Image (cartoon, coloured by chain):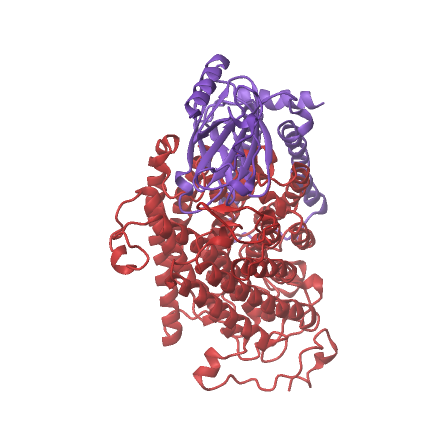
Amino acid sequence: MISSQADATTADRSIPAAPRLRAPRRALWRYVFTTDHKIVALQYLFGTLAFLFFGACLAMLMRWQLGWPMQRVPGLGRVLPALSSQGGIITPELYSSVFSLHGTIMVYFVVIPLAVNALGGYLVPLMVGARNMTFPLLNALSFWAYAVGGTILLGSMFTEGGAAAAGWTAYAPLAALGTSGQDWWIIALLLAGASGIMSTLCYVTTIVNGRAAGMTLGRLPMTAWAMLATSGLTLLAVPALTVALLLLLFDRNFGTSFFMPSNMIVSGERLANPGGGQPLLWQHLFWFYAHPAVYIMIMPGMGMVSDMLPAFARKPLFGYKSTALATCSIAFLGFLVWGHHMFQSGMNPYLGTTFMISTMAIAAPSALEVFNWLATLWRGSLRLVTPMLFILGFLSLFVIGGLSGVFMASTPVDIYVHDTYFVVAHLHYIVFGGSMFAMFAAIYFWFPKMFGVLLGETLGRWHFGLTYVLFNLTFFPMHMLGVGGMQRRIYDPTIFPHLAAMQPVNVWISVSAYALFVAQLVFAYNFVRGLWRAHQGTGPRAGDNPWEANTLEWQTTSPPPEGNFVERPIVVRGPHEYGSPECDAKGVEHLPQNVA
Amino acid sequence: MNSLLTKFTLGFSATAVSFPWLPEQSSTYAPGIDGLFYLILGISLFFIVLVHVLIVVFVWRYRQRQGRRAFYTSGNRRLEALWFSIPAVILVVLVILSQSTWSRIKTAAVWPAEALTVEVLAEQYAWNFRYAGPDGKFGALDPALMDPYNPWGRVEDDPDGADDVMTINTMAIPVNEPVRVLLRSKDVIHSFFLPDFRYKHDAVPGMTMEFHLEATRPGDFPLACAEFCGLGHYRMKGTLHVMPRAEFDAWLTEQAEEGQP
């Protein structure tokens, strides 16, 4: 049926006729072993939200130890007897595993897959007007690699010696020495990396080859631009991580010394390894991936904000071209800044200067995007519903997080703040305040498309208000701890007198963090209630286009059918035509991309 | 040029009222680093306030109301170029200021030729220090000899090493004098962190890091490990004693005598 359509001569050459447009009847094939990108994306969504909950629980454990060092955690001895032999006290071993797992889970198993695979994977084919990914099976396979990797990571907690305990950065040679949990950590990350490669290969090809008729690059929604740039980053950066992980696996198990010099003496014993390796090599390879990974986490959110904001301001994105250009230049520059994590590592100080220049340079396109978003608000007609509130929160926190990054970009200031809580504050403002606020906005925005039901507005507003306030109460004081000289990843700050003097701040942060955690239960309830209503067919129905938005995913049913569109759309204009002269001429308020 | 820039940063540091959380400046590096810190803080606060005022004003003025519609515009090249350029110019200035401070700290060419040398050997979870002793010469080291009883791997019969002073977790330096530090690690990566000095440098096994420090006031200062190095990372704690030259010489002699059999 599709091959007979009029648009067979267009950009969509690579997608053959869909063999069938009806979803498989059996639940197993429909919901589990599916190749439909929408269901795969939902698998990612549920997977990442489950991991988010677990990662947040780990953060709660850390805040307990930092707020009230060596105090018994109620119930811990009963829940995790194997991990906490000290009758409910968090031991240094457990603490190290907990912060390592928290970082690993949040980066590799929550924020990246939530932004890129859950929301990005849901939206890319719909937004470009494709029926599915160009490689649907590869896309489905990426989820299974992710799921197996995640399971292995969780399982590693129950190995002898516990989970990996060298931080999410796993700096060698420390990571080359740890217990077997570190091997499972490596394998889990290899799978997560493979999942990233497989899925982003689908996104690139779908955006490049799978676009509907008339969907020129200049009409692509900004989410698709961001996903294109993000996918490029993933495809080029993950191989560096894979190499580093394999070398580390060799160092640990097969007697090589890629990251270990000669004459290492650990706990009084001379290591038998041949030596001759270089610990800084790990940092270079790791950050060559992990700095782009920061942009992999934030850029999909920036793209989605650029598409949601016009729908709530009822006017086009201010500066479509410069925003797209900024997105691409951030992706390009993102590859040239990895050394700014290594200013104090012993890397040549002249290289430090180079990386300072490139890092400062990347701030300019980021600032351009922020001002473009502000200008989009200017003289708009702002609809202040939950997703819009989260967008405003994103703007606010992303600006603070971006500016606190300038302190670290300045090499001399970094001498002091590097590896302190200032960095912890900065990265949470970017990853939680930036990426996660954008993801919350996106979930409130696209939930009705995914399930046909709107999320509760009152609950959503409470969720936003509590999260925004409590986020700042939790993470802002961490800047002060860092400025006061509190180093990262310490089990008990009170043993240093100058840090013990700041202990009330740690208590304050812990209390705020618990409140922040509880506030997320409002979201959990809202989300589960939405799913229940969708299942029962009750509650306020969303309709096809509840936000009166223009992009293609809103021009089909909620949720979209197998094959996404009953008839493939033909695109005639850009994604943000709200209140344009053409609209006035036609007597409508907004014009979707495909309406002739 | 460099001294002009330095004066500017230092002036900024002096005018900024002491931020309640920064430890008291205790090294020659602290004023320059704090000056840049306050400068970036000032710029950041300006933009944070600007953006938040704009958000609040826009949300209030342009909230959806009956009978009002959005103004249609899809951008303005000049404005976009303007707000790309303003941050870019500020960042160029910051790069220049930062580089002048960075090169004063990190460039070997500006380090003094003569300075007291302290060797630091980091290990899980302690700091070892070595001084040349009265003869001013360090004894030879051989990594093959390192063991729990000889953490440095000293060559026992080397006469230069006979009066070497070795301490654990206690470092002392004279005030107002440049000190050359040679930093190494015997196991994993550590980081030599003196908050009051605003100084930090990673200790990487297999590499020797060289840097210079100059204390500006006497006192006892905490030395922490800033790079996660294992379960005992948090308790890898030392103390730096800064004292007048005469007191330091007495301390060194005392340590040398204590070390004799």
When the figure is inspected, residue B172 is found, relative to residue A134, above or below; the finding is above
Provide residue B252's location: percent of width, then percent of height. 47, 20
Residue at image x 68%, y 65%? A573
Let me know if residue A231 appears in the view.
Answer: yes
The colour of chain A is red
Provide residue B198's location: percent of width, then percent of height. 52, 29
**Can you name the residue that lies furthest to the right here?**
A9
**Can you name the residue that lies furthest to the front here?**
B157
Which quadrant holds the N terminus of chain B? top right
Provide residue A218's location: percent of width, then percent of height. 71, 61
Q: How many numbered marks, from 0 up? A: 0
Question: Camera-side residue: B54 or A470?
Answer: A470
Q: Is residue A39 left or right of residue A338?
A: left
Residue at image x 54%, y 34%? B155
Question: Camera-side residue: A377 or B261?
Answer: B261
Q: Is residue A498 left or right of residue A378?
A: left
The colour of chain B is purple
Question: Camera-side residue: B13 or A255?
Answer: A255
Which quadrant holds the C terminus of chain B? top left
Let me know if residue B52 appears in the view.
Answer: no
Question: Camera-side residue: A432 or A75?
Answer: A75
When the figure is inspected, residue B217 is found, relative to residue A355, above or below; the finding is above
Q: Is residue A553 left or right of residue A362?
A: left
Provide residue A349's location: percent of width, then percent of height. 65, 36
